[in-house]
Amino acid sequence: MIVAIDGPAGSGKSSVSKEVARRRGLTFLDTGAMYRCVTLACLDRGVNLRDEDAVARLAHGIAITFGMAADGSQTVRLDGADVTEDIRTARIDQSVSIVAAQPRVRERMVALQREMGAQGDVIAEGRDVGTVVFPHADVKVFLTADAEARAHRRAVQREGGDTAKADASVSVAEERQILDDLRRRDELDVTRTESPLKAAADAHVLDSSGLSFDEVVETVIGYMG
Ligand code: C5P
């Protein structure tokens, strides 16, 4: 079975997908982490993000692997080094859309994602999973939420808090910065020519703004039948 969850940044795709994966025994595939790895590799190795030849070469030459930490959380490795935290920083948030807009980078990532999808039952989350990566997915969900709700979740996540708790407190300034970044990133993801962020025609569109975490998880599991 393949379940595809797409949606804008901070819509809860990742935490919802992980929980559905846990409850239904699926492998969780975080496609955004892969674009983040390419971006981190460029920044660390001094590759100009706008030099499409150099970025494409790098995207084809790196190894991205997923593993599991002792506490059961997912780890991400770039050429063997654990980059789970390094790919979640603000500097990656600010640059990843430039890399993700490049056709040759996408071609490589989509090929890797399909290889991973061929290995068993998968719930994959990203921006183009239901439209491009797995157009024949068994279940497609397009998860949205209003921008403020998404920014709040991201801010709580970055402080190591529990996004399932609506009242978790974070600084207003930080939340505003995250909101600006989210809006800018959504704009770039929606307007790019290559695989823009959009709902597949056969996706269930689910707005999580007024729903609890559990309600969203239950709804997605309900779609799976
Ligand atoms: O989901 P996450 O915020 O980690 O994704 C980081 C970035 O990677 C997104 O803003 C988007 O530019 C890109 N992305 C993409 N296609 C995907 C997943 C992520 O273009 N399937």
Image (tube, rainbow, N blue to C red):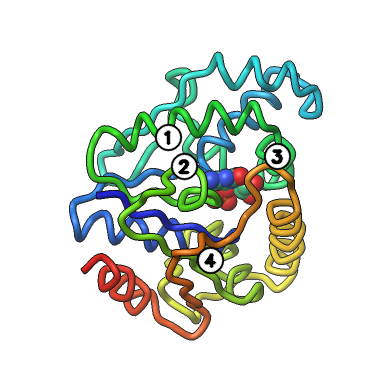
Looking at numbered disc 1 in the image, what kind of residue is underneath it? Gln
Query: Which quarter of the picture shows residue 38?
Result: top right
Q: CA distance from mark 1 to mark 2?
A: 7 Å
Q: Secondary structure at mark 1?
A: helix
In the displayed structure, does residue 222 sit left or right of residue 151? left
Q: Is mark 1 within 8 Å of ligand 1?
A: yes
Q: CA distance from mark 1 to mark 4?
A: 21 Å
Among the two numbered marks 4 and 3 on one chain, the one whose residue lies closer to the N terminus: 4
Which residue is the site of mark 3? 101
Residue 89 seen by the camera: no
Which residue is the site of mark 2? 133
Q: Residue 75 in the image: x percent, y percent? A: 38, 37
Residue count near mark 2 (Cα–Cα under 10 Å), binned few <14, some 14–19, many ≥20: many
Residue count near mark 3 (Cα–Cα under 10 Å), binned few <14, some 14–19, many ≥20: some
Q: Is mark 3 within 8 Å of ligand 1?
A: yes
Looking at numbered disc 2 in the image, what kind of residue is underneath it? Val
Q: Quadrant of the C terminus?
A: bottom left
Identify the disc placed on residue 113. Answer: 1
Q: Is mark 2 within 8 Å of ligand 1?
A: yes
Q: Nearer the viewer, mark 3 or mark 2?
A: 2
Q: Residue 64 in the image: x percent, y percent? A: 46, 26
Q: Are marks 1 and 4 in contact (CB under 8 Å)?
A: no
Q: Secondary structure at mark 3?
A: loop
Which residue is the site of mark 4? 11
Q: CA distance from mark 2 to mark 4?
A: 20 Å
Q: Are marks 1 and 2 in contact (CB under 8 Å)?
A: yes
In the displayed structure, does residue 45 sit left or right of residue 71? right
Looking at numbered disc 3 in the image, what kind of residue is underneath it? Ala
Q: Nearer the viewer, mark 1 or mark 4?
A: 1
Among the two numbered marks 2 and 4 on one chain, the one whose residue lies closer to the N terminus: 4
